[in-house]
């Protein structure tokens, strides 16, 4: 029997192709995507009578929250409200991917709906024109749960030749990476690049720059597409921050941040002011920077210590790195290297804005 995470069937692209070409008779398929109670992704498909012209044309829907750890069995309805829409690179045509927020029947955000509060923070601080860019690292595993291309029960040669590598024995599953990159471009996701990472079978892609809440929407849908593409190749995607113990690099979600003030002349003083604020809330940030991050942030393998905030120019061993070019020009952005690869971009960008510009008053609950 196949174990959890294993797959004995890979998509039969040839058989599927003839069905994908069938006429939809003017109707459209909308893939509703949401975040569950484990920081994972769920989805289901809705047939629409016509193509939506904007996210406002998409109806609210619901699902069984007791099956996603988002609601009790005796009150299991959770509602999904569309917040962002993308062309569907899997089904093509006028079909769409729909990112959703989760809401409870009483009209309040579900406790795992971190987007809502982040969006409020972004809107309240829109005058600062906050740009984000996230660097998503991940590891590809085979059906047996071992990194793709690694010797069964063994290890490849030491790290060194794999980062940005080329050639058999240096990179694995490039076809998945290429397919995912093109799928994101078709969907209109702001994917800005990709590269092989330090550990073999580990890759990275970058999303951004995006303004405000858009970054979280784009990154979550890009993650969904990565899982969906990997299905067709029989591979497993893991965002675990330290998938292989020992002398192997972990996986992060480095977060690049820039405000209007930081990009203007004299911006370095605003970057330095942000460093003081980040230092003061280090523990609060680490709480929402990803589960299992302590196994990654040991001070080795291009990480800082999880217990202490540090920053430096061009220093990849610090909590926050300021690129040398930015220091030279006296303006630009900074890179927070603390977030783990499995971190929630809504929580990461939300706490960043809260730290730099202050929290918002509690939102009144509906009567």
Image (spheres, helix red, strand yellow):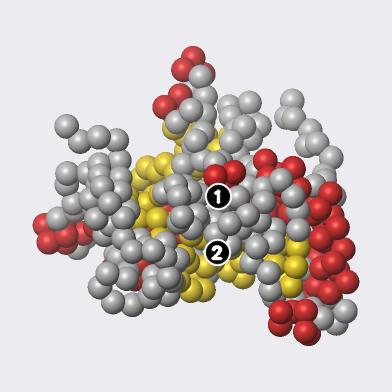
Location of residue 220 with respect to 7 vertically, above or below: below
| Residue 84 in sight from this viewpoint | no
The residue located at (88%, 79%) in the rendering is: 266
Q: Nearer the viewer, residue 153 or 22?
A: 153
- The local secondary structure at tag 1 comes to loop
Q: Which residue is mark 2?
A: 135
The residue located at (25%, 73%) in the rendering is: 168
Q: Nearer the viewer, residue 186 or 168?
A: 168
Residue extending farthest to the bottom is 329
Q: Which residue is mark 1?
A: 296
Q: In 3D space, how far apart are the residues under numbered discs 2 and 1 (Cα atoms)?
A: 16 Å
Q: Position of residue 309 (x, y in %)?
A: 76, 53
Residue extending farthest to the top is 74
Q: Nearer the viewer, residue 14 or 46?
A: 14
Q: Assess whether mark 1 and mark 2 are in contact (beta carbons under 8 angstroms).
A: no
| Residue 13 in sight from this viewpoint | yes
The residue located at (80%, 36%) in the rendering is: 362
Badge 2 local density, few (<14 within 10 Å), some, or many (20+)? many
Badge 1 local density, few (<14 within 10 Å), some, or many (20+)? many
Q: Which mark is residue 69?
A: none
Q: Quadrant for the N terminus, please.
A: top left
* Left or right of 274 in this view: 76: left
* Left or right of 207 in this view: 269: right
Q: Position of residue 40 (x, y in %)?
A: 46, 42
Question: Marks 2 and 1: which is nearer the front?
Answer: 1
The residue located at (25%, 35%) in the rendering is: 3
Q: Position of residue 308 (x, y in %)?
A: 74, 50
Q: Quadrant for the C terminus, please.
A: top right
Q: Position of residue 221 (x, y in %)?
A: 47, 56
Location of residue 81 with respect to 255 vertically, above or below: above
* Left or right of 245 in this view: 277: right
- The local secondary structure at tag 2 comes to strand
């Amino acid at each position: 029997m196949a174990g959890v995470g294993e797959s004995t069937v890979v998509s039969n692209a040839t058989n599927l192709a003839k069905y994908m070409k069938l006429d939809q008779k003017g109707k459209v398929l909308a893939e509703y995507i949401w975040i569950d109670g484990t920081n994972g992704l769920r989805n289901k498909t809705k047939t629409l009578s016509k193509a939506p012209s904007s996210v406002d044309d998409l109806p609210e829907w619901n699902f069984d929250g007791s099956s996603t750890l988002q609601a009790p069995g005796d009150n299991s309805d959770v509602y999904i409200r569309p917040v962002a829409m993308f062309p569907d690179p899997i089904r093509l045509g006028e079909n769409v991917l729909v990112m959703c927020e989760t809401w409870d029947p009483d009209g309040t955000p579900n406790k795992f709906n971190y987007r809502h509060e982040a969006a409020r923070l972004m809107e309240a601080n829109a005058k600062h024109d906050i740009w984000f860019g996230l660097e998503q690292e991940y590891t590809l595993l085979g059906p047996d749960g071992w990194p793709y291309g690694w010797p069964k029960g063994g290890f490849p040669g030491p790290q060194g030749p794999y980062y940005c590598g080329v050639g058999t024995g240096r990179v694995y599953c490039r076809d998945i990476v290429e397919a995912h990159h093109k799928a994101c471009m078709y969907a209109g996701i702001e994917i800005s690049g990709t590269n092989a990472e330090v550990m073999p079978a580990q890759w990275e892609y970058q999303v951004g720059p995006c303004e405000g809440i858009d970054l979280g929407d784009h990154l979550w849908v890009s993650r969904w597409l990565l899982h969906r593409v990997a299905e067709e190749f029989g591979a497993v995607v893991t965002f675990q921050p330290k998938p292989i113990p020992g002398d192997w690099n972990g996986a992060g979600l480095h977060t690049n941040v820039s405000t209007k003030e930081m990009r203007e002349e004299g911006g370095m003083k605003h970057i330095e002011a942000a460093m003081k604020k980040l230092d003061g809330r280090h523990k609060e940030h680490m709480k929402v920077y990803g589960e299992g991050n302590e196994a990654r942030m040991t001070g080795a393998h291009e990480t800082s210590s999880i217990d202490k905030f540090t920053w430096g120019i061009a220093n990849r061993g610090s909590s926050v790195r300021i690129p040398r070019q930015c220091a030279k020009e006296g303006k630009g952005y900074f890179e927070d290297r603390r977030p783990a690869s499995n971190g929630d971009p809504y929580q990461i960008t939300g706490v960043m804005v809260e730290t730099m510009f202050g929290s918002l008053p509690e939102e009144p609950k509906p009567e």
